[in-house]
Image (spheres, rainbow, N blue to C red):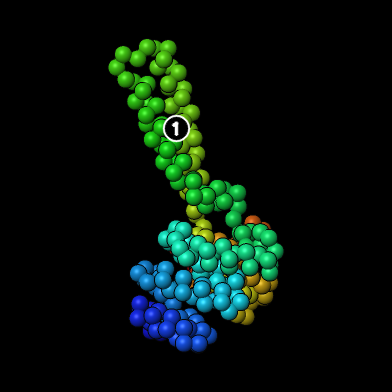
Amino acid sequence: MATLDADLIRQAVLQARSGQPKEALGLLLAHPPGPSSADASHYHLTVGSLLLDQGRPGEAFAHLDVVLHREGLIKPADDLWLTAREQAELKLGRGSLERASNTIEKWVDNPFYLPLEAFLAVLSVAAVVRCYRKGALPSSRKIWIRWAVLIWALAFGAGAGQILGSRYPRSRAATEITLRSGPAEDFYELGRVDAGSELRILEKNDGWVRVRVTPTVSGWVPSASVLLLTPPSTTRES
């Protein structure tokens, strides 16, 4: 399989503008980017836009969510992301795209979680310094020690939550896929996963990944049908 580069993306864009959007999409889908490709965001933005234009909002949302996690809110990706999400949820039902994460994972996924964790860490250090600053009265020192212990406990809890919440990488189904009981096509079919659905990767095995679809449902899908939103370093190999 040929590797993706900026020239290939430009070729696909020109092909789409010349009235061949399906051919342009096929060209890009046949040349997915590597995990560290510098053109990955451009690729997913282009693919997401083409999919949305062709009435495939779930697949478009999966690709555009990759851009959101890599680059943050940028124009025009955020507008396309919102449009794709709204159309996909209109088709599948409100909240149907976000069912894989447990409560801790949802907290950690919140964009305010990391800044809060850093703030608590800094605040705990400041409280300790305040306790032992020169000239502090014993009564005042006792109060600051209590505050330092409380803040430190909160910071420790936030750090533990970060570890637990990021244990299983977050991803999305790039297309509608079959959930199976094992890592091969001949295992039992457990159900279908809609394109754009949130997944949590539990482990990998020779081209397949075991994913959590809801807190109580998991199964195996081909790894090529899953788009990672978070680094795969914590994914366990079998």
The image quadrant where one finds the N terminus is: bottom left
Residue designated by label 1: 152
Residue positioned 35% across, 15% down in the render = 136
Position of residue 186 in the picture relative to residue 67 (left or right): right
Q: Residues within 10 Å of mark 1 (few under 14, many from 20)?
A: many
**Count of picture labels:** 1
At 39% from the left edge and 26% from the top edge, which residue is drawn? 127
Outermost residue, front side: 18
Residue at the image position 50 percent from the left and 54 percent from the top: 167
Tag 1's secondary structure?
A: helix
Foreground residue, 162 or 190?
Answer: 162
As drawn, 156 above or below 88: above
**Relative image position of residue 16 (x, y in whole percent):** 48, 83
Q: Position of residue 119 (x, y in %)?
A: 42, 38
Instruction: Give the image quarter of residue 70.
Output: bottom left
x then y, percent, for residue 58? 60, 70
Of residue 187 and residue 119, the one placed in the foreground of this image is 119
Q: Amino acid at mark 1?
A: Trp
Residue 236 seen anywhere in this rendered image of the structure:
no
